[in-house]
Amino acid sequence: MVRISRQAYAQMYGPTVGDRIRLADTELFIEVEEDRTVYGDEVKFGGGKVIRDGMG
């Protein structure tokens, strides 16, 4: 199985469990508590990427 860093994963697929996100221009942060995406089934949108019916 290929392993990538948390930073690389977040840049490709977005935040996941344990990641903290700053809300706009505020000093408020949220933390992802649950991610229902199964590892390996992540979807990328845009830039000519395609997904199969039922995956998005």
Image: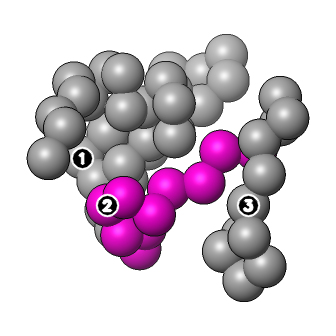
Q: Position of residue 2 (x, y in %)?
A: 19, 38
Which is more toward the observer, 11 or 54?
54
- Residue 20, x across and y down, in percent: 36, 35
Name the residue carrying label 2.
39
The residue under label 2 is which amino acid type? Tyr
Left/right placement of residue 44 relative to residue 6 reads right
Q: Quadrant of residue 10?
A: top left
Q: Which residue corresponds to the image point at 36% horizontal and 49% vertical from the top-left? A: 16
Q: Is residue 15 magenta?
A: no
- SS of the residue under disc 2: loop
Residue 15 higher or lower than 25, as above or below: below
Q: Residues within 10 Å of mark 2 (few under 14, many from 20)?
A: few
Mark 1 highlights which residue?
Answer: 18
Query: Which element carries disc 1, helix, strand or loop?
Result: loop
Q: Earlier in the sequence, mark 2 or mark 1?
A: 1
Q: Which residues are magenta?
A: 36-45
Q: Is residue 29 visible?
A: no
Q: Which residue occupies 73% across, 61% down?
A: 51
Q: Could you tell which of marks 3 and 1 lies nearer the N-terminus?
A: 1
Q: Amino acid at mark 3?
A: Ile
Q: Which residue is mark 3?
A: 51
User: In the image, is residue 37 part of the stretch drawn in magenta?
Assistant: yes
Q: How many marks?
A: 3
- Calculate the distance from the C-alpha at mark 2 to the C-alpha at mark 1: 15 Å
In the image, residue 30 sits, relative to residue 38, either above or below, namely above
